[in-house]
Amino acid sequence: MKIVITGGAGFVGSTLCLQLKENYPSYEIVAFDNLKRRGSELNLTDFQKKGIPFFHGDIRNNEDLSSLGNFDVLIEASAEPSVTAGLDSDPTYVINNNLYGSINCFNACLKNKAKLIFLSTSRVYPIEIIEKANFIEEPTRFSFDENQTELGISKNGVSEKLSLNGARSFYGTTKLSSEMFIQEYAAFYGLKAAITRFGVIAGPRQMGKTDQGVVTLWMAKHYWNQSLKYIGYGGTGKQVRDLLHVDDVVSLIDLQIHQIEKFQGKIYNVGGGAENSASLFEMTSICEKITGNKIQIDSEVETRAADLRIYITDNSLIEKEIGWKPTKSVEQIFTDIYHWIKENENQLESILK
């Protein structure tokens, strides 16, 4: 089997390349990436060691995709992942990459009669609906109230039943548009595809920044004793996300590659779930425990555009229909990131510090 992973030198893409190659040595695993994100070039050495071919290309360019030759599966993990992309500047790049580039990938799958694994996002759900959900303020976090008026939000989080009507960010809109195109390709061209709306994915190999990769950023700042800031919602750090270890993502995608018929015509929400959620305040405590370092954390009361007070994934549907569920805890995620930084400190210092 030949598997192409677009965004292959990114966080999720590189982890997929290396773990799939380890699990299936006879498979040809190909990494395809434009190396736009700083730090992605560090993965090329690991690819070379493991015999993973690397193609320097861009999904916006059909000629680059054609240079890959024939393949059996394409995993589309090449999105511009920042929620704030295009909000305070020209949105052309995020639209061209996440929508038009993805459509080029779909066409490449048709040409090769290949299966498509599409990594979508929880950000397809409208901001205003989630922000208006009933919540309670606890000592260390915000939580969804048990009493909700909106179908698709409960104390367990956000399910696939939540309305899609409303603004969501250019990032979320391009991903939702791609989902809709996949449904058309499946209905009229017979494309075999799996679509997954992932929440926050975290773990080693992520080059964390403020707008994307906050879990790695939080650990890195504690590791190097640098300051951080709680931004928005009163500046208390109580906003919450559920966290999904990248290894759990790989296990699900492995299943999708080999049993795609279980996922065809369906869309699942996938994340760490309520049991694997944490506020920024709680993340601080975890990082202090693991590193032994206590750092300065400032506060900024004003909330940023497109931010969410709470996002937790309700995994009920995929657990019921597929039997998949996350296996790694929040503390395990931070511990694994800590060891990754420690083992690669010299390479990562200029990027994460």
Image: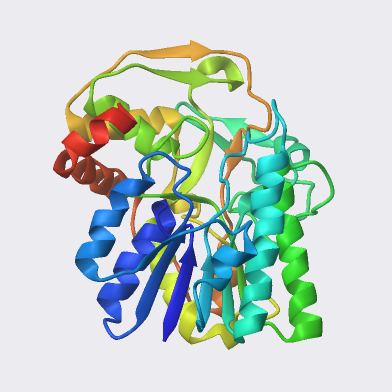
Residue closer to the observer: 106 or 324? 106
Residue 220 at x, y percent in the picture: 29, 31
Residue 178 at x, y percent in the picture: 72, 61
Residue 49 at x, y percent in the picture: 20, 64
Residue closer to the observer: 293 or 47? 47
Q: Residue furthest right?
A: 165
Residue at the location (23% across, 29% down)?
A: 223
Residue 228 at x, y percent in the picture: 39, 19
Q: Is residue 287 above or below residue 149?
A: above
Counting the numbered discs, the total is 0
Q: Is residue 114 above or below residue 327?
A: below
Residue at the location (30% across, 81% down)?
A: 24
Q: Quadrant of the N terminus?
A: bottom left
Residue at the location (51% across, 56% down)?
A: 271
Note whether residue 101 is visible. yes
Note whether residue 169 is visible. no
Left or right side of 124 for 334 = left
Left or right side of 143 for 37 = left
